[in-house]
Image (spheres, rainbow, N blue to C red):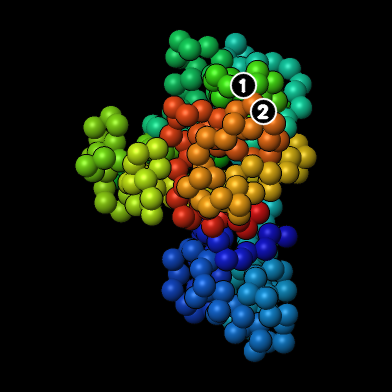
Amino acid sequence: MVVYKRGSVGEQVKQIQKALGIKADGIFGKGMEDAVKKFQQENGLTVDGKVGQKTLEKLMSNMDTDLSPIVKPESILDIENYYLPKNEYVSGKFKNDYIILHHTAGWDNPKQVVDYWAKDSVGRVATEFVIGGQRCTDGRNIYDGKIVRAYPEGNQGYHIGASGSTYMNTHSVGIELCNMGWVKNGKTYTGSIVRPDQIVSLNEPFRGYIKWHKYSDKQIQSLRELLLYIAKRDNIDLHKGIYQWIKQEGAEKAFDFHQDAYDGKVKGMLCHSNIRKDKFDMSPQPELIDMILTL
């Protein structure tokens, strides 16, 4: 059973907000936490501000609202297999010790990303999973949050590049979020004009940039469910790496280069920018950080 709490985002959160009668923006913030506590207190439930099965069931019994798709979270994670040709990934059965987060610096359509990998000339560079997003120019969202698997479980793609540990390339799960990356003067690195509501401004510059193409709520929710799935599947500790660095160093430093990560010594959840000084993925977007802290 998924427990929704402060930092959770997505359509499921929005449905719970509607049931509570509060603003339905899909973001579980302090206001929603207070509303949940009030509801729990009024209905004789444990007052912890978190929405688990008992709180969901009480919401359904008290109100004319069907939250059954949320009570049964197995319906949330929907992965479509869209495999690369066999010569475009590394075949074998590898034990994964790392999860590496990336963004594509490209299209919103995850299948288009996989198609590009199949046709490029750089060899077996790919990630196991790609999560669709919103198009930065007009907000198109038909692929938003959709998860595609690019090769069968247990195989690998060279998604890290140069690092201090060749072991990492064949013992890590890569996840790409469809996202254009940094934004300067309202444009992406390709010159595309970004719609204002697709831009997020950070508190401090990251890799020299304040403004970035925003990871969508659905992307972040899909990423959360996917991380929990992979952590269970591959026995990877999600509290090692980015999570612990956010707690110890703060958000911006957590996403920056770490020598121990480069050397392969941190087995857990990392992002590409932890391993490579020349990479920009991922950006420390507040909503992404809030989600990571709920894991």
Q: Does 148 sit above or below residue 156?
A: below
Residue labelled with disc 1:
164
**In what element is the residue under mark 1?**
loop
Q: Does 205 sit above or below residue 96?
A: below
Q: Which residue does the image show at 52% across and 72% down from the upper left?
A: 30
Q: Residues within 10 Å of mark 1 (few under 14, many from 20)?
A: some
Q: Which residue does the image show at 53% across and 66% down from the upper left?
A: 28
User: Toward which corner of the image does residue 20 lie, by quadrant?
Assistant: bottom right
Return the x and y of residue 39 as percentages of the image width and height: 61, 83
Return the x and y of residue 40 as percentages of the image width and height: 66, 82
Which quadrant of the figure contains the N terminus?
bottom right
Q: Which residue does the image show at 26% across and 48% down from the upper left?
A: 195
Return the x and y of residue 43 as percentages of the image width and height: 68, 87
Any part of residue 244 in sight: yes
| Left or right: where 275 falls relative to 61 | left
Camera-side residue: 98 or 43?
A: 98
Mark count? 2
Which label number is shown at residue 264?
2
Q: Identify residue type, mark 1.
A: Gly
Any part of residue 222 in sight: no
| Left or right: where 233 falls relative to 257 | right
Camera-side residue: 69 or 180?
A: 180
Q: Identify residue type, mark 2.
A: Gly
**In what element is the residue under mark 2?**
loop
Dots 1, 2 in contact, CB < 8 A: yes
